Amino acid sequence: MSLVEPRPKRPIPIRITPLIDVVFILLVFFMLTSRLLPVDHLELANNTSSRSPATGEPIPELTVAANGRVQWQDLTLPPEALLPRLIAAGITEVNLGTRADTSLGTFTRALSELAANGIDVHWKRRSAKTP
């Protein structure tokens, strides 16, 4: 009784299609997992050299109410009336928050108006419930 099958007399052809599939899958895998640019060339927009949290002035906080008015310090004005005061004070960057009853459209209008006038606006989350 023979435990090993005898070799066929004619050579078995090597099918190349599965090999091409494996090479293609490996190529896709390595392309997706590798970095396209060296880390030295990544551009990061986190220039914080001009201000320090310990010694610099804090960024002013603005709050948008449900009626579209924006609160800054003790003033509550519409964005178009508040903009000249911010520019006169030399403010170029603000944190913008909302009250709980402020709609998304109202917030977006205030944010767009501030950004259109050259003020860098950052959204400040007021609470964990804020969307």
Image (cartoon, rainbow, N blue to C red):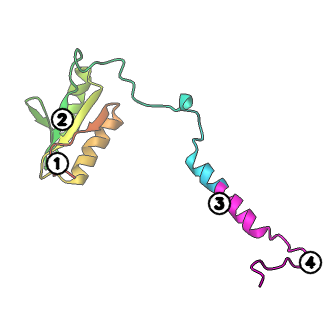
> Residue 121 location, x and y as percent?
29, 35
| Numbered label attached to residue 25 | 3
Front label number (2 vs 4): 4
Secondary structure beneath dot 3 equals: helix
The 10 Å Cα crowd at callout 4, few under 14, some 14 to 19, many 20 or more, is: few
Q: Which residue is mark 1?
A: 128
Extreme front residue here? Answer: 1
Going from N to C along the chain, the mark reached first, 2 or 4, is 4
Q: Which residue is mark 4?
A: 10
Q: Residue 27 versus residue 82: which sits nearer the camera?
A: 27
Q: Give the distance between the C-alpha atoms of the residues marked 4 and 3, in whole angstroms.
A: 32 Å
Front label number (1 vs 3): 3
| Numbered label attached to residue 62 | 2
Amino acid type at image mark 2:
Leu
The 10 Å Cα crowd at callout 2, few under 14, some 14 to 19, many 20 or more, is: many
Q: Is residue 59 above or below residue 24?
A: above
In the image, residue 9 lies in the stretch drawn in magenta: yes
Q: Give the distance between the C-alpha atoms of the residues marked 3 and 2, in whole angstroms.
A: 52 Å
Going from N to C along the chain, the mark reached first, 4 or 3, is 4
Amino acid type at image mark 3:
Ile
Q: Is residue 48 above or below residue 65?
A: above
